[in-house]
Image: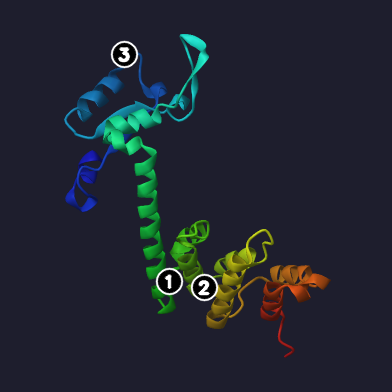
């Protein structure tokens, strides 16, 4: 695995953290010793356990009044370098990942509009709804998918009253685009459930509710 990840196609010196369950080792600790010897010749490879203290705070065995921080930031710093565990660098990398995710979702949305099969990206598109940076591209991708689950995700977003009007309106527009391309693919029971919710007197004051009602109301034919 280490040799595979170090190949040029995967980038230069990708760090590898090998997790070891102490319960898997035998009494003579030969398993651990063998792993340490195997990984000794590789740079940026670190062997650690998966005990709770790696990610959770713990009491100091020498002083039960002292709480020790999780070991993961220090493990990451020893594996990749001191900067890897700093908040600024982690936030910067998070922004870069969101930018790349937005580009990827936008590209998939364009391919879906041209007829390419993009349904396998449904989970990624739904996750993209959770971030402002990826939200528009995720809407476009869901609107391009000819599957009921994509329309259901857009409809659920549109009917959530806690969300802002701009978010709900964007979801309605994407749902309308999906219905125009693929027709309304929602289950009949779910359509009537939403319509009954918007039969309240307040629907007249809600432009999103009016748009959803007009979209889901069956044709008189």
Q: Residue at x 58, y 64 (%)?
A: 153
Q: Nearer the viewer, residue 78 or 45?
A: 78
Q: Nearer the viewer, mark 3 or mark 2?
A: 2
Q: Mark 2 falls on what kind of element?
A: helix
Mark 1 or 3 closer to N-term?
Answer: 3
Q: Quadrant of residue 159?
A: bottom right
**Marks 1,3: beta carbons within 8 A:** no
Q: In screen coordinates, is 24 left or right of 66? A: left
**Marks 1,2: beta carbons within 8 A:** yes
Marks 3 and 2 sit apart, C-alpha to C-alpha, by 59 Å
**Residue neighbourhood size for the residue with mark 1, other residues' Cα within 10 Å, grouped as few (<14), some (14–19), many (≥20):** many
Vertical side of 96 occupied by 72: above or below: above
Marks 1 and 3 sit apart, C-alpha to C-alpha, by 55 Å
Residue under label 2, please give it. Answer: 143
**Residue neighbourhood size for the residue with mark 3, other residues' Cα within 10 Å, grouped as few (<14), some (14–19), many (≥20):** few
Q: Nearer the viewer, mark 1 or mark 3?
A: 1
Q: Position of residue 95 (x, y in %)?
A: 39, 53
Mark 1 or 2 closer to N-term?
Answer: 1
Residue under label 1, please give it. Answer: 109
Vertical side of 70 occupied by 220: above or below: below
Residue 152 visible in the current orientation: no
Residue under label 3, please give it. Answer: 28
**Residue neighbourhood size for the residue with mark 2, other residues' Cα within 10 Å, grouped as few (<14), some (14–19), many (≥20):** many
Vertical side of 83 occupied by 220: above or below: below
Q: Mark 1 falls on what kind of element?
A: helix
Q: Position of residue 163 (x, y in %)?
A: 63, 60
Q: In screen coordinates, is 7 left or right of 214? A: left
Marks 1 and 2 sit apart, C-alpha to C-alpha, by 8 Å
Mark 3 or 2 closer to N-term?
Answer: 3
Q: Position of residue 192 (x, y in %)?
A: 74, 71
């Amino acid at each position: 695995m280490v040799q595979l990840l170090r190949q040029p196609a995967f980038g230069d010196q990708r760090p590898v953290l090998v997790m070891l369950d102490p319960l898997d080792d035998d009494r003579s600790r030969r398993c651990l010793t063998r792993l340490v010897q195997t990984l000794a010749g590789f740079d940026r490879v670190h062997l650690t356990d998966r005990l709770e203290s790696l990610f959770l705070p713990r009491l100091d065995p020498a002083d039960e009044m002292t709480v020790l921080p999780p070991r993961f930031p220090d493990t990451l710093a020893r594996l990749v370098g001191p900067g890897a565990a700093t908040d600024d660098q982690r936030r910067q990398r998070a922004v870069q990942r969101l930018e790349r995710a937005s580009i990827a979702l936008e590209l998939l949305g364009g391919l879906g509009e041209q007829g390419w099969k993009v349904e396998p990206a449904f989970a990624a598109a739904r996750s993209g709804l959770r971030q402002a940076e990826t939200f528009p591209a995720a809407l476009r991708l869901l609107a391009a998918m000819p599957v009921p689950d994509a329309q259901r995700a857009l409809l659920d977003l549109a009917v959530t009253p806690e969300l802002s009007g701009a978010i709900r309106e964007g979801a309605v527009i994407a749902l309308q685009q999906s219905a125009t391309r693929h027709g309304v693919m929602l289950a009949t029971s779910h359509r009537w459930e939403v319509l009954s919710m918007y039969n309240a007197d307040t629907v007249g004051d809600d432009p999103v509710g009016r748009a959803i009602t007009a979209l889901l109301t069956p044709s008189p034919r």
